């Protein structure tokens, strides 16, 4: 499965292809497979440095989160690594998109478990995007269980607490979609090395 299969990201894929083409045509030197360190950045004697080191998936402190049946959302976007039924932990933008991809692109069942009272509450994007995503979710048999806290993941599925009661959802795969944290280490190390 490739990123191309994810119809939600088709416009993003087109833009990425466009940007790569523009970059190649610009004559900009691109060095791949080379780690940037403060020493080699300083040795480059650059006029300015742009640090775009990405982010890492937030892994919640849930018992069993490192189990064999657990996938990160990014893995799901790149390949069909889910079983017939998946529980997506997190109902933000990434979690909702992952659930849609599982249902639409892979033809499998997805259930969202969100700790907040509704999905997409922490998302900061255009209202039209929010409405469209909610509309797309409504057209699929995706169940969203909100105001719920996942307490454990095991081989049978997930266990969660809601309204003072314990529940479980049997599933083959658990997808972690609890947000991202920036990778700022290099940026912080470069503060003393470069001016701009």
Image (tube, rainbow, N blue to C red):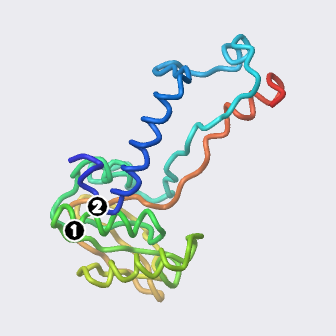
Pick whichever, 28 or 48, lies toward us: 28
Q: Quadrant of residue 133?
A: bottom left
Q: Is residue 113 left or right of residue 139?
A: right
Q: Quadrant of residue 103?
A: bottom left
Q: Is residue 99 left or right of residue 15?
A: left
Q: Is residue 25 left or right of residue 2?
A: right
Q: Quadrant of residue 54?
A: top right
Picture coordinates of residue 119 (x, y %)? 46, 78
- Which mark is nearer the camera, 2 or 1? 2
Residue positioned 41% across, 54% down in the render: 12
Picture coordinates of residue 10 (x, y %)? 33, 56
Q: Compared with residue 192, is residue 187 higher up or lower down, i.e. above or below?
A: below
Q: For the residue carrying disc 1, how many other residues have a C-alpha within 10 Å: few (<14), some (14-19), or many (20+)?
A: some
Pick whichever, 69 or 28, lies toward us: 28
Picture coordinates of residue 23 (x, y %)? 50, 32
Report the Cα–Cα distance between label 2 and label 1: 9 Å
Residue 185 got which mark?
none
Picture coordinates of residue 89 (x, y %)? 40, 66
The residue carrying mark 1 is 104
Q: For the residue carrying disc 2, how many other residues have a C-alpha within 10 Å: few (<14), some (14-19), or many (20+)?
A: some
The quadrant of the picture occupied by the C terminus is top right
The residue carrying mark 2 is 7
- In this view, the residue farthest toward the top is 43
> Secondary structure beneath disc 2?
helix
Q: Compared with residue 133, is residue 41 higher up or lower down, i.e. above or below?
A: above
Pick whichever, 13 or 66, lies toward us: 13
Residue positioned 69% across, 18% down in the render: 41
- In this view, the residue farthest toward the front is 25
Q: Earlier in the sequence, mark 2 or mark 1?
A: 2
Q: Is there a contact, CB below 8 Å, between mark 2 and mark 1?
A: yes
> Secondary structure beneath disc 1?
helix
- In this view, the residue farthest toward the bottom is 163
């Amino acid at each position: 499965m490739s990123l191309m299969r994810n119809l939600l990201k088709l416009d993003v894929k087109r833009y990425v292809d466009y940007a790569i083409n523009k970059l190649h045509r610009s004559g900009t030197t691109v060095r791949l497979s080379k780690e940037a360190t403060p020493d080699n950045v300083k040795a480059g004697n650059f006029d300015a440095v742009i640090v775009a080191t990405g982010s890492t998936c937030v892994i919640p402190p849930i018992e069993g989160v490192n189990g064999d049946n657990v996938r990160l959302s990014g893995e799901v976007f790149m390949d069909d690594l889910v079983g017939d039924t998946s529980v997506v932990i997190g109902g933000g933008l990434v979690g909702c998109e992952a659930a849609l991809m599982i249902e639409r692109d892979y033809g499998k069942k997805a259930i969202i478990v969100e700790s907040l009272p509704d999905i997409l509450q922490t998302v900061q994007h255009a209202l039209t995007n929010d409405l469209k995503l909610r509309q797309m979710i409504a057209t699929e048999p995706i169940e969203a269980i909100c105001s719920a806290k996942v307490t454990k993941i095991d081989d049978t599925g997930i266990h969660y607490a809601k309204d003072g009661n314990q529940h479980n959802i049997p599933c083959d795969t658990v997808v972690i979609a609890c947000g991202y944290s920036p990778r700022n280490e290099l940026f912080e190390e470069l503060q003393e090395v470069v001016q701009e």
